[in-house]
Amino acid sequence: MAAELNKFLTFTIEEENYGLPILRVKEIIGMMNITYVPKMPEFIKGVINLRGKIIPIMDLRLKFGIKERTYDDRTCIIVVELESSSGTRSTGLVVDTVSEVLAINKEDVEVPPISLGETDQEYITGIGKVKDKVVMLIEPQIMLSKDEKEMLQKV
């Protein structure tokens, strides 16, 4: 298990590369019909029924402040587990495309510059350098505020 600590599932949003710790990822699924839930933040697109389990869906483009786009055949949902004070909840993250699993050595990860350290970007835990690419490493557990996590528990 220790060998997986530096492995990341990489994906793209717009033209940028991002990575999630592989241990946070439960599964990757294609787009499904999303049922709208009223009075949710714009980035919460609604819920899906995945094998009898209701899972809230968050569009990472909108969460990151990037313009929304029409979903296509490359758009995927990455299912992760998020913990809150009321328990653990599977949550789907909509991304433009899923790329690959990369092993990124700790020596190839830099701390995000101070300019990225604003309150709403604390979830960027590092910047990985892989060959000629830069991969923004994100931690889904700290991507949402406490209130947003609690709200997802009620969906």
Image (cartoon, rainbow, N blue to C red):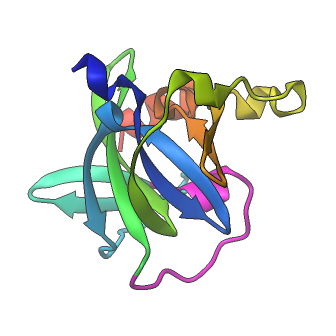
State the image coordinates of residue 116 (x, y, percent, origin top left). Answer: 82, 33
Q: Is-magenta flag for residue 69?
A: yes
Q: Residue at x 46, y 52 (%)?
A: 10
State the image coordinates of residue 98 (x, y, percent, origin top left). Answer: 42, 63
Q: Nearer the viewer, residue 18 or 4?
A: 4
Q: Nearer the viewer, residue 135 or 24?
A: 135
Q: Image height check: is 127 above or below 57? A: above
State the image coordinates of residue 5 (x, y, percent, origin top left). Answer: 36, 24
In the image, the segment drawn in magenta is 58-73
Q: Residue at x 30, y 74 (%)?
A: 32
Q: Nearer the viewer, residue 109 or 30?
A: 109
Total number of numbered labels? Answer: 0
| Residue 144 in view here | yes
The quadrant the N terminus occupies is top left
Q: Image height check: is 126 above or below 19? A: above
Which residue extends farthest front? 131
| Residue 41 in view here | no
The quadrant the C terminus occupies is top left
Q: Residue at x 56, y 62 (%)?
A: 12
